[in-house]
Image (tube, grey):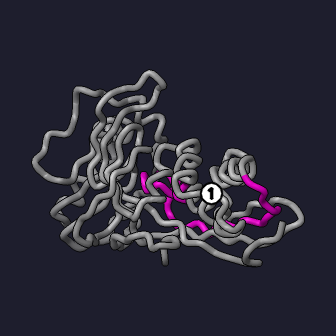
Amino acid sequence: MKLRHQNKSFASPAKLNLFFRVLSKRPDGYHNIVSLFQAIDLFDRLFFSPSTKDIFTCTDPSIPTDDSNLINKALTLFKAHFPTPTLHIHLEKNIPVEAGLGGGSSNAATTLWALNELTNRPATLPELIEMGSKLGSDVPFFFSQGTALCRGRGEILDPYSIPPLSGYIAKPSYGLSTPAVYQNVRIDESSQTESPYFNDLEAPAFRLEPRLATLKAHLQKQFQNVIMTGSGTALFCLNGKPKPIQGVTFYPFHSICRSLSWYCS
């Protein structure tokens, strides 16, 4: 089978959780949540080209390129359903890891979308969403229009509309494991706030990494709203301007929508 295009690249966006409520622990070990997801203009980029065998490479040497990577898992899953030629997939990594920005999930969704485009679209959008849900709770979101109210373990999507949003992401040099954060969730300590921006995962994340609570307090002197996204350790900051903080990288961001094709960088 020949590729529809010989060489092609696709943008793979990060996401924010503008609010994140943990509702309950599920029998399958996951948590029921409700969260407002928003895609933003911080992108990885994935390159696809013909190859004599399947190869996955990455600009970041710390990223595993074996079968544990969601890109390889997405390729294997797609191939199990549809004829797919052998490919060299190259990831240009820009989204910080262990940040709560959904980089790995976005990479998986982008891989599924790209493979479908390159093989003359054998899968429908609902089929891509279903495949994505098998790879991770956050993967289906990236098939939305860029803003969605997500329920269940994150795989149930409802379209949502908000005004354009911009601000800064503050990413400290240290990270947190998503499973570790969820293992420390206490259902009875939900965020109590009148703000539209909150995250129930802050309490367990701050217990695991007290420096993150200190960083948030520092950032609140510079911004009106400072909230951790996902399981951290990135925080999104609204209505203010950043001042340099040792060990913290700031990324400006704007909210984005998915076009009829895919996200545009």
Q: Secondary structure at mark 1?
A: loop
* Amino acid at the residue labelled 1: Ala
* Residue 134 visible, this angle: yes
Q: Residue 225: where, in percent of width, then height?
A: 19, 60
Quick one: which residue is furthest to the right in this view?
52
Quarter where residue 238 is shown: bottom left
Q: Residue 35: where, in percent of width, then height?
A: 31, 47
Quick one: which residue is furthest to the top in this view?
27
Magenta stretch contains residue 98: yes
| Residue at the spot 65% in from the left edge and 65% down from the top edge | 121
Would you say the magenta stretch is mainly helix, strand or loop?
loop
Is residue 202 positioned above or below 227 on the image?
above
Quarter where residue 203 is shown: top left
Q: Residue 182: where, in percent of width, then height?
A: 41, 34
Name the one closer to the observer, 73 or 241.
73
| Residue at the spot 59% in from the left edge and 71% down from the top edge | 45
Q: Residue 196: where, in percent of width, then height?
A: 17, 53
Quarter where residue 61 is shown: bottom right
Left or right of 80, for residue 121: left
* Residue 228 visible, this angle: no
Is residue 105 positioned above or below 120 on the image?
above
Magenta stretch contains residue 78: no
Is residue 161 positioned above or below 75 on the image?
below
Quick one: which residue is furthest to the left in this view?
194
Name the one closer to the observer, 251 or 9.
9
Name the one closer to the observer, 250 or 6.
6
Q: Which residue in the protein does label 1 denote?
A: 123
Residues rendered magenta in the picture: 82-106
| Residue at the spot 46% in from the left edge and 34% down from the top edge | 180
Q: Quadrant of the N terminus?
A: bottom right
